[in-house]
Amino acid sequence: MSKFKAWLKTIIFYEILVGMRATLMHLLHYKPITVQYPHEKRTLPSGYRGMLALLRYDDGTEKCVGCDLCEAACPSRVIRVVSAEVPGEPTKRYSKEYYMDMTRCLFCGLCVQACPVDALGMTREFEWSVYDKRQLHLNKEQLLAIGDRSYPVREKRLEMQHPNVAFFNVAYKTLPQKAS
Amino acid sequence: MTELGLRAAISLVQIAAVMGVVMLTVMILTLAERKVLGWMQDRMGPMEVGPYGILQPIADGLKLFFKEDIVPAGANKFLFSLAPILALVPALIGFAVIPFGPNDTVEMFGIAFKPFVISDINIGILYILAFTSIGAYGIILGGWASNSKYSLLGGLRSAAQIISYELNVGLAIVGVLLLSGSLSLVKITEAQSGWFWNWFVIALPFPQIFAFVVYVISSVAETNRLPFDLPEAESELVAGFFTEYSGMRFAFFFIAEYANMVLVSCIAAILFLGGWNAPAPFLQFNGSLANLAWLSGIFWFTVKVYFFLFLFFWIRATLPRLRYDQLMRFGWKVMLPIALANILLTSIAAYLFPTGKP
């Protein structure tokens, strides 16, 4: 009997009919999962790791203290930092030059975690396709510009400033007075 | 002389109309296929050109028209140019004997002609079979003339496949011919008038349901559609016989494939589903509206043809490609015996219970 059933199923193409019913059900209950990308975009998850950026404080000073830890943390050697003293401030350093080769970046976020002063941030930008690969070699000004448009407000927490430690890079004019 | 000229003019107008309708159908099909496949696979299909992508066929046509015409090095230029035409012409020429609507005779300028069939020849189905077989030459020559291994393999596969399944198509329709007693598509359709149980797919004395299934499967194989698209299997042969083709020559192959689909759908609708006949007599214009019967006839014919075309897309969305030995085994060991047995049983039934049809 089961043999007869199997034979019957073969001659009426039972499996094919089941499959065709499945496709027809998808046609009738049409719910596309496609996102029409340039016109509509997916909601990015929180903690999305997009384009890297250098950040500033509210008063316009750069956060980066030129410590090179990001360069050390980077697994694919994206970052190159040239560190220098702040002119006239022998205890403070800043990054004179800061380069990122975004063609190699794998967006792991290790540099952001390594940064002791939160000078690096990952924005939510991801549409960085360019016609010329060299446009992905970013310098400090470009990275700061990305940071400015993605992180408009970064407050400066002066209470964390120890007077004898070159921790925050601060604008010269608003230097907190050292305790004497 | 004027009569001859008038006849030629009327025929040309008919040919132009039918060609226009077929080309329009092909245009609709290219969009409909992508849309239906998309919907079945939870996608949207083309959405960019025009509202909901309905102008996509025009964009595709423009793109193909303006593309560079490339003839590969070492190709046989003459055959390379001839092959797309050889594929396209047989696909379009078959529509000459397809009756789209009722077999009315209209008299205009003193000349009687049938508006819904270009030429009602008494061997219509034989003529279509003969010409669709020529279409295989286009594919084989295109594959050979391209000077490419993939093209040649695609062409050879296509030759084997079309020969195998052309045979089954021919044998599957013999049952219908036995029951209707004619090779003319108009007469075959007229033999199925009345209620839907007069359609040959379920008509007594012997329902042609097996022949119908054999015909549908074989026609899918004959038009090189999935799941029988071995000649152009992307994963194995790049694009099969038209790997080297681009621009308008590729478009010719493309149109030929879709025109073939329309043609086999028309034949299936005429032979098995009663052509222009409505499922029930009251579903067509009659009585006081009897002179509008052609409208309902064309409507029902279109519905049936589009049902088959949808079936093509549906099967394509559902089934994966067959392996080559499966294809051949299925054609020769399954389809062929069924078709032969169907002929035998139909002729016995037609002998024992003559339908009274000529």
Image: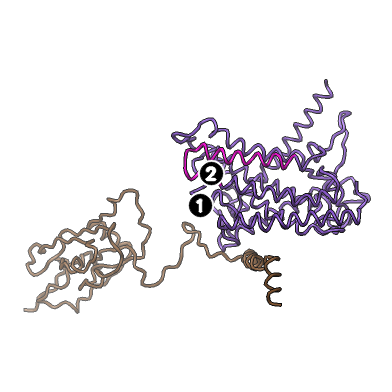
Chain colours: A brown, B purple
Tell me which chain the residue with mark 2 is part of: B
On screen, residue A82 versus residue B173, left or right, reads left
Q: Residues within 10 Å of mark 2 (few under 14, many from 20)?
A: many
In space, the residues marked 2 and 1 are separated at their CA atoms by 11 Å
In this rendering, is residue B100 above or below A62?
Answer: above
Q: Is residue B302 magenta?
A: no
Q: Position of residue B147 (x, y in %)?
A: 47, 38
> Could you say which disc has been placed on residue B234 in the image?
1
> Could you say which disc has been placed on residue B35 in the image?
none
In this rendering, is residue A8 above or below B218?
Answer: below
Q: Position of residue A175 (x, y in %)?
A: 14, 70
Judging depth in this view, the residue of A145 and B24 nearest the camera is B24
Q: Residue at x 85, y 49 (%)?
A: B180
Q: Quadrant of residue A120?
A: bottom left
* Residue stretch in magenta: B127-156
Residue found at the far top of this picture: B1
**Of the residues under marks 2 and 1, which one precedes in the sequence?**
1
Q: For mark 2, what is the residue?
A: B241
